Image (tube, helix red, strand yellow):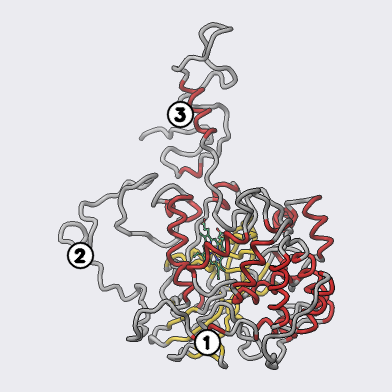
Amino acid sequence: GQPDTVTPTGAPTGAPPEAFAQQGAYLTTAQGTRLRDTDHSLKAGPRGPILLQDHHFREKITHFDHERIPERVVHARGAGAHGVFTSYGTASKLTRAGFLAAKGKETDVFVRFSTVLGSRGSADTVRDTRGFATKFYTDEGTFDLVGNNMPVFFIQDAIKFPDIIHAAKWHPDREIPQAQSAHDTFWDFVSLHTEAQHHTMWNMSDRGIPRSYRTMEGFGVHTFRLVNDAGETVLVKFHWKPKLGVHSLVWEEAQLASGVDPDFHRRDLYDAIEAGAYPEWELGLQVFPDTPEETFAGIDLLDPTKIVPEELAPVQRVGKLVLNRTPTNFHAEVEQVAFHLGHLPPGIDVTNDPLLQGRLFSYLDTQLTRLAGPNFHQIPINRPHAPVNDMLRDGFHQHAVHGGVAPYRPNSLDGGNPFPDSDGFVDVPVTVTEAPKVRDLPVSFKDHFSQVRLFWQSMTPVEQEHIIRAYTFELGKCYEQAIKERQLQCLADIDPVLCASVAEGLGLPAPAPTAALPEVTPSPALSQVGRQWPAD
Ligand code: HEM
């Protein structure tokens, strides 16, 4: 037979590209030609100019010139790790998704944590929301749970996303980030678009400065729909609960860490995994009946600025996540991973939340630019662990050598007709009403303050003190007095003590509420003091 040919890495010829580890006895060009010299360019004499014919020089420099890809338009700064999800089997009556339904079933995962606003090189411990995005490589296709460490979002309709991000990222003229400088545009936006007040208070709370990725909760934010084998559906919200409990830094620690170790969270994650202290979370569900109103206890489940207090709908555990492997190559894995809310296995479906619906468009669209074309699903970190037979063809950066002559189904030339496939994805046949086309949101989306009050009143005194200090510090950075005053009016419509305390810190009068403040029932589960999850 044929003798085995070997590459410099010792990988057999024909092995997948990831086997080429850039190690070995000798160096080659990208074409595999062995090199005698990589330190000197080819010149017209020892003192002469470089010759255009020096292919190795041009290949090496050209490739270097193109090493960077665009950072993510949001969530640019992040860190990721590999792990395993183990199902408890407790969701088997709710969903046909095998990775959740089958007890003991293990599924590979990749998780990317991130800040939202900073650029790739920014500090980890700034006050911000954190991304918590999980890719489950299930046997039935990839499921991406693209969540945050806060259960609510700034806006109710995706069409406002460019606006909130423009208001919150760097200044267009100075490119100074909002996070630690002048804050006029951020506070201008959230005081004018008052649905942002709930998320803003989460940011001003200790949740905005987590101690570690390992001590953050994660939330799918939107309501999703699960469907079981019998076609029965429920509405659910996804929760990640950290085994270590929820812990934050205090502001002074966060400030110091930003200066002394801007990689504080990244280092903490990788050091812990390398030391064998694998971070763990449990996945939980809040489960609601799938009624035509899509509400629970009077709360509109399609409004992403609202939570359902855990006292009303307990979080039921369905599985465990363990992160046990750091990336081999940051660029290949953490930078090139591409999450998408539309990556759903059979058994999980979306709802009509207008923020979710817009996200379904945005992620693929941005990734077409960020990852240069339509074939980024072939990048190793993005490859499903389920068999793929997608009929997609050609395009930039095509790595597959697709066989077959008839890339359409059914066909009579090339393997026939695989449909109908009883294991295939089923879109839940939700009735779409005969209402006219409108741009307005439902009336139930108009209450912007009662859940902010709920959050505030659920905090312990020390957490309230931290919130007051955060508002005072951050608003104190605004140049425009009118913006501070408008935000104080919002605080007055949340709670008079909060408003008076921040106003005093800013040296401004405290306005009266615009209307009587309705009572709320506090939710102790929102406080992180004394909260350890899960209890063993
Ligand atoms: C990226 C979460 C709303 C557009 C991300 C990432 C997370 C996230 C975790 C980082 C993914 C990664 O690590 O690669 C959320 C949550 C939202 C939300 C929880 C609300 C509940 C939106 C909306 C839009 C949007 C409304 C646009 C309409 C984007 C874009 C990226 C991104 C363009 C960059 C994706 C990439 O370059 O791969 N988001 N997001 N997000 N998000 Fe969102």
Secondary structure at numbered mark 2? loop
**Residue matched to label 2:** 410
Q: Is residue 243 left or right of residue 530?
A: left
**Residue matched to label 1:** 444
- Residue 116 rendering spot, x and y as whole percentages: 62, 60
Name the quadrant of the N terminus.
top left
Q: Residue at x 44, y 17 (%)?
A: 53
Q: Residues within 10 Å of mark 2 (few under 14, many from 20)?
A: few
* Label 3–label 1 contact, CB within 8 A: no
Q: Name the amino acid type tagged 3.
A: Gly
Q: Residue at x 45, y 29 (%)?
A: 32
- Residue 76 rendering spot, x and y as whole percentages: 59, 54
Q: Which mark is residue 32?
A: 3
Q: Earlier in the sequence, mark 3 or mark 1?
A: 3
Position of 455 relative to 82 (above/below):
below
* Label 2–label 1 contact, CB within 8 A: no
- Residue 41 rendering spot, x and y as whole percentages: 55, 17
Q: Residue at x 43, y 90 (%)?
A: 292
Whole-number angstrom distance, CA of label 2 to CA of label 3 = 42 Å
Q: Earlier in the sequence, mark 2 or mark 1?
A: 2
| Nearer to me, 196 or 527 | 196
- Residue 297 rendering spot, x and y as whole percentages: 57, 93
Whole-number angstrom distance, CA of label 3 to CA of label 1 = 64 Å
